[in-house]
Structure formats: C-alpha cells, structure tokens
C-alpha cells in the first residue's frame, strides 16, 4: 500500500512559511533598532526557519511515494534529504552566532537600547513560534512526515532562543546589564547545534537503510499464518509509520503454486495490518527447504 501525504505537508509548510517570515521581520526590525546582537542572531535563526520551509516544499514535491521506472521504490528519501538540509542550515546559523559574539567581545560595539513596546513585539513573536512548533509537530506525527517533525524541532529551538533573548533584553532594559546580550549568544549557539544534531540523528538511519522492524517480529507474524513452515533472510528498511519495505524467504507447506500464492497473500495482509503502509516481497521456498536463520548474519560473524 502506498501512502501519499504530500498535499497536507505542503499546506502546513506554506502556512508556517508565512508565519516564519512575519517572525523574522519583527525580530530583524527590533534587532536593528536596538542594536542587540543576540536578537539579530535570533533573527538569523528565523531566516533558517523560512529557508527550511522552502526547502521542505521542494523536498515534498519531489518525494512522491509512487514508484516509476527510475525510482522503483518511490521517492520518499527526498524528504529525508530535506530534513538533513535543515541540519546544514542549523550548523551555518550556529557558526554565524558564535562568530558575531566573538567579534563583539574583541572589538566591542554600541550599547543595546530597548523599550517596553519593543519587548511586547517580541512576546508576540514568541507566541507565533510556539503555535508553529505545536502545529507542525502535531500534523507531522499524524501524517508521518519527517520534514514537518524536523522543522518543528528546529522551531522549538527557536522558542527557547527567543525566551532567552527576551530575558536578556529585559535585564538590559531594567538593570542595564549590557553583558547579557553577548553572554546569551553562546547558549543560543549551543541550542541551535543540538537541534541540528537531533534532526541528523533521526533521519540518517532512513537514508542508510537501517533496519526498520525487528526480524523476530516479522517472523512471528509470518509463522502465525496457516501453511507457513518458517521464514528466513528477513530484511526491512524505511520509516515505520511512513513507508516500510520488507523482504523475506518463506517456506510454505503447499502442493502447488496457487496454494503457495494464497498463503503469501495472507502473510502480506497480516504484515500490512500491523505495519501499514508497507510493501512486501516474498520468495517462496518448498517444504523440504531447511533454514534456522531468520535474519542476515552480522559482520562480526
């Protein structure tokens, strides 16, 4: 079974793109008017939010699950590639933030000047970021979209960054602690780096075809079907809940090809019920075939 969630993913990305552009504009406006390095760094972080939405729209358009001649397994990995692109953007933002903070420490700069109305604008920005985070994450989990979940993770880091920056600016506005602006730039960079690492860690296994389902779980379902003697050389890849591919050799107790075909269809049906959406490829073995190995040997063996 093929599951195509691209229309809903594109709708969410367009909505969040508009909101992220609004957030970026407000941060940049307040950042330039106050001369705050931490806020300008936060605005740079928001630039990556908008770039990620655009990247996600491109990746979503390319990531059709429907196979064709050149891509017989579909194009789902384009979406994972898009998520890795988000990691790259986060790495660039981290470097820019650290570079700006170090330069201000060495060369100095103009003092930050902030007013109460500008702080209220930043609270509006924070509210929009929180809405985008929970909206994207909820839809991403519901439709099984790595790009939406990855972008929500990125935006969540933006929420924490904005909270820290607002706290620092309140300190500057109320107590004139100018050092807070530079000091906050460093934890901002660490949060950005951690977000990028989380996105990379979640999507790399899909790109390198890491096992999606434990072979023992697949084996238990297959042998529960009447007529199945055993199954071996079980392999799976993909993303559970998004699209999984399963391959196996099935030993069946069948006197003819038609009976063997019916047995394999029942196995496929039960696997689809448990791991949908999934595409299953089964190689049928005769009853006399013997194998105790349900999966592939490890490299250590």
Image: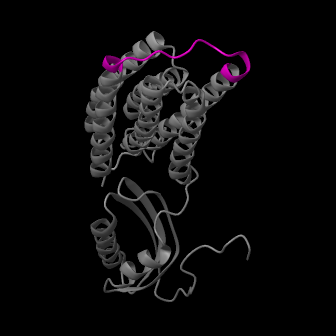
Q: Is residue 75 above or below residue 301?
A: above
- Image quadrant in which the C terminus is located: bottom right
Which residue corresponds to the image point at 39% horizontal and 28% vertical from the top-left? 53
Which residue corresponds to the image point at 57% horizontal and 28% vertical from the top-left? 93
Where is residue 147? Give x, y as percent: 41, 40
Which residue corresponds to the image point at 38% horizontal and 54% vertical from the top-left? 243
Where is residue 202? Give x, y as percent: 50, 51
Judge by depth and name the residue closer to the eye, 127 or 273. Answer: 127
Which residue corresponds to the image point at 45% horizontal and 45% vertical from the top-left? 72
Write the start and end of the magenta stretch as one range: 104-118
Q: Is residue 273 left or right of residue 299?
A: left
Judge by depth and name the residue closer to the eye, 123 or 57. Answer: 123
Q: Is residue 104 above or below residue 59?
A: above
Judge by depth and name the residue closer to the eye, 146 or 231. Answer: 146
Q: Is residue 41 left or right of residue 135?
A: right
Can residue 199 be seen at all in this image of the molecule? Answer: yes
- Image quadrant in which the N terminus is located: bottom left
Q: Quadrant of residue 14?
A: top left
Where is residue 28? Give x, y as percent: 44, 16
């Amino acid at each position: 079974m093929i599951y195509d969630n691209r229309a809903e993913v594109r709708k969410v990305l367009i909505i969040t793109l508009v909101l992220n552009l609004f957030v970026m504009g407000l941060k940049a406006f307040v950042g330039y008017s106050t001369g705050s390095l931490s806020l300008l760094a936060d605005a740079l972080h928001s630039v990556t939010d908008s770039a990620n939405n655009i990247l996600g729209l491109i990746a979503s358009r390319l990531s059709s699950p429907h196979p064709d001649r050149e891509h017989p397994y579909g194009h789902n990995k384009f979406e994972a590639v898009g998520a890795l692109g988000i990691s790259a953007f986060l790495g660039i933002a981290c470097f820019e933030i650290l570079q700006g903070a170090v330069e201000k420490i060495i060369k100095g700069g103009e003092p930050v000047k902030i007013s109460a109305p500008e702080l209220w604008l930043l609270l509006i920005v924070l509210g929009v970021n929180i809405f985008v985070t929970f909206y994207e994450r909820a839809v991403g989990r519901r439709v099984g979209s790595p790009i939406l979940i990855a972008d929500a993770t990125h935006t969540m880091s933006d929420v924490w960054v904005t909270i820290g920056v607002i706290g620092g600016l309140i300190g500057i506005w109320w107590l004139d602690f100018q050092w807070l602006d530079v000091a906050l730039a460093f934890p901002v960079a660490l949060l950005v780096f951690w977000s990028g690492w989380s996105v990379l860690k979640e999507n790399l296994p899909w790109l390198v075809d890491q096992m999606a389902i434990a072979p023992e779980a697949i084996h238990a379902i297959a042998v529960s079907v009447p007529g199945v003697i055993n199954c071996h050389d079980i392999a799976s890849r993909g993303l559970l809940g998004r699209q999984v591919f399963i391959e196996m050799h099935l030993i069946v107790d069948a006197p003819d090809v038609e009976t063997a075909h019916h047995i394999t269809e029942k196995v496929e049906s039960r696997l689809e019920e448990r791991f949908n959406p999934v595409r299953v490829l089964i190689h049928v073995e005769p009853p006399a075939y013997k194998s105790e190995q349900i999966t592939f040997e490890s490299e250590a063996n």
